Amino acid sequence: MKNLIVIDHPLIKRDLSILRNKRTDNHLFRTTLRRISSVMAFQVTHDLKVRPGFVDTPLERTKGYALAEDIVIVPVLRAGLGLVDGFLDFLPEAKVGHVGLYRNEETLKPVDYYSKFPRNLKKSLVLLLDPMLATGGSGAAAITFLKNKGAKKIRFVSLLAAPEGVRKISAAHPDVKMFTAVLDRQLNSHGYILPGLGDAGDRIFGTE
Ligand code: PRP
Ligand code: URA
């Protein structure tokens, strides 16, 4: 599918199976989410540009590198919070913004309730994090939000994506590259991803 990169990695496949398992409790769900998000972060950042410079080892001066671009990580509340620490493990220099959205259970339309972004949003590469890309309503709204605040380069990172959501983001935001750990089959009549993993926010935070 256009603009979609499915990250294929044995560690991701193993962790996704733990996340999908209905017997996985909240604690194991959270720790697995953190680990899988690190592997995702590694892959999503594989082509970032670096700025060459020098570094002094205890013995001599040699070539060194820093990331050439500022990075802003933006989790979509709530479930995106479960991916933040894994990304920060690899991107400790990143700033973190937040977008609060929830889906109205009847209409499946996103409702926004919070946003806060760092100042350097406009000139940064923004990594928008949400484990679930279902109808794509929340993802598309979060991207519009970021663009209205001046973000120009955005990558959307999910773990499970439904074809409907991928098509929606591609159509609404053709400039945004999407990364996911798996492209699932379809949505059910309540907008849940099949086979999916259930409600990500509830499984992270133990709510229902
Ligand atoms: C989930 C998920 C996404 C959204 C995806 O959030 O984390 O943000 O649903 O669905 P969509 O692609 O159809 O918009 P939810 O609305 O359950 O809110 P929560 O994270 O606060 O539980
Ligand atoms: N949000 C979730 O948490 N899970 C789904 O399957 C769809 C939307």
Image (cartoon, rainbow, N blue to C red):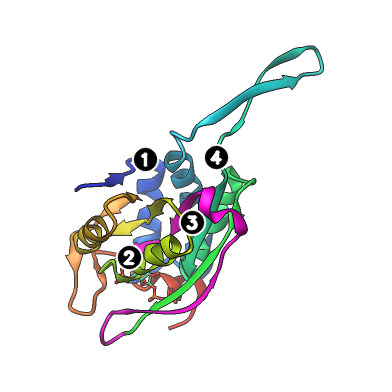
Residue 65, compared with residue 91, is above or below; it is above
Alpha carbon of mark 4 to alpha carbon of mark 2: how far?
24 Å
Helix, strand or loop at label 2? It is helix
Q: Disc 4 vs disc 2: Cβ atoms closer than 8 Å? A: no
Answer whether labels 1 and 3 touch (C-beta < 8 Å). no
Looking at the image, is mark 1 or mark 3 earlier in the sequence? 1
Give the mark, 4 or 3, whose residue is nearer the N terminus. Answer: 3
Q: Is residue 64 positioned above or below 124 on the image?
A: above
Q: Residues within 10 Å of mark 2 (few under 14, many from 20)?
A: many
To which residue does mark 1 refer?
10
Counting from the top left corner in percent of width and height, residue 157 is at 40, 53
Residue 8 appears in which quarter of the rendering?
top left
Q: Which residue is mark 2?
A: 140
Q: Which residues are magenta?
A: 105-132
For badge 1, the amino acid type reads Pro
Quadrant in which the C terminus is drawn:
bottom left
Q: Is the residue indicated by label 2 positioned so its CB lies within 8 Å of ligand 1?
A: no
- Label 4 – label 1 distance at C-alpha: 29 Å
Residue 160, how many percent across, how many down? Answer: 32, 58
The kind of residue on which mark 2 rests is Ala
Compute the Cα span from label 4 to label 3: 29 Å
Query: Which residue does the image show at 37% across and 54% down from the upper left?
Result: 16
Q: Decide if residue 123 is in sight here.
A: yes
Q: Residue at x 46, y 68 (%)?
A: 79
